């Protein structure tokens, strides 16, 4: 079961990176060119929100069934924190990805409250760019390629 969920999590991550990249670029272009906010922009930012939340749910399942997660195996915290690979999978990656999803959610929620195009794009650009950078930083690239 773990292998199947891991494969889904890995392949869905490609979609997440693609969509969040598109949403971030769209928000930045919209903000800097001062164009009107259109339904297409709403859909792109919404789709980025949806795919990241789905990825988070898959990640939570992996967190509880993965053999590399040591929190539930009575392994001392000092051993987890002392091993860079265990620390990555047990602490750094899950925490950062929760922050990424939180930033995207906040940006999406804040942009809906703005009434004009420039502030809408500004909220999306700020939060999605920070989330995008954090996401790229914390992806375990060695396992991707």
Image (cartoon, grey):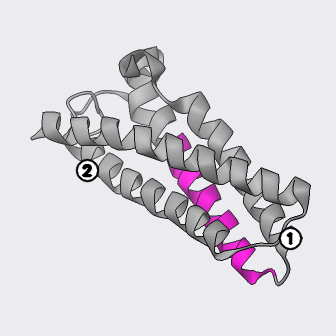
Residue drawn at the location 50% of the way across and 63% of the way down: 47
Give me the disc on residue 129: none
Nearest the viewer among 111 and 96 is 111
Residue labelled with disc 1: 119
Which structural element holds mark 1? Answer: helix
Q: CA distance from mark 2 to mark 1?
A: 36 Å
Q: Which residues are magenta?
A: 95-114
Alpha-carbon neighbours of circle 1 within 10 Å: few (<14), some, or many (≥20)? some
Residue drawn at the location 45% of the way across and 41% of the way down: 94
Residue labelled with disc 2: 61
Residue drawn at the location 31% of the way across and 41% of the way down: 9
Left or right for 64, reference 29: left
Left or right for 80, reference 113: left
Nearest the viewer among 75 and 58 is 58
**Residue 138: x and y, percent?**
54, 31
Q: Say whether residue 99 is magenta.
A: yes
Q: Quadrant of residue 12?
A: top left
């Amino acid at each position: 079961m773990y292998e199947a969920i891991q494969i889904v999590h890995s392949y869905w991550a490609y979609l997440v990176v693609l969509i969040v990249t598109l949403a971030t670029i769209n928000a930045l272009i919209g903000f800097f060119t001062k164009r009107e906010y259109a339904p297409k922009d709403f859909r792109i930012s919404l789709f980025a929100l949806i795919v990241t939340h789905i990825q988070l749910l898959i990640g939570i399942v992996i967190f509880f069934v993965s053999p590399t997660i040591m929190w539930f195996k009575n392994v001392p915290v000092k051993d987890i924190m002392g091993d860079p690979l265990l620390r990555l999978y047990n602490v750094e990656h899950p925490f950062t990805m929760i922050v990424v999803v939180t930033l995207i959610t906040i940006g999406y929620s804040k942009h809906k409250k703005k009434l004009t195009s420039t502030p809408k794009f500004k909220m999306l650009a700020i939060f999605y760019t920070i989330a995008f950078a954090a996401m790229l930083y914390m992806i375990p690239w060695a396992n991707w390629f």
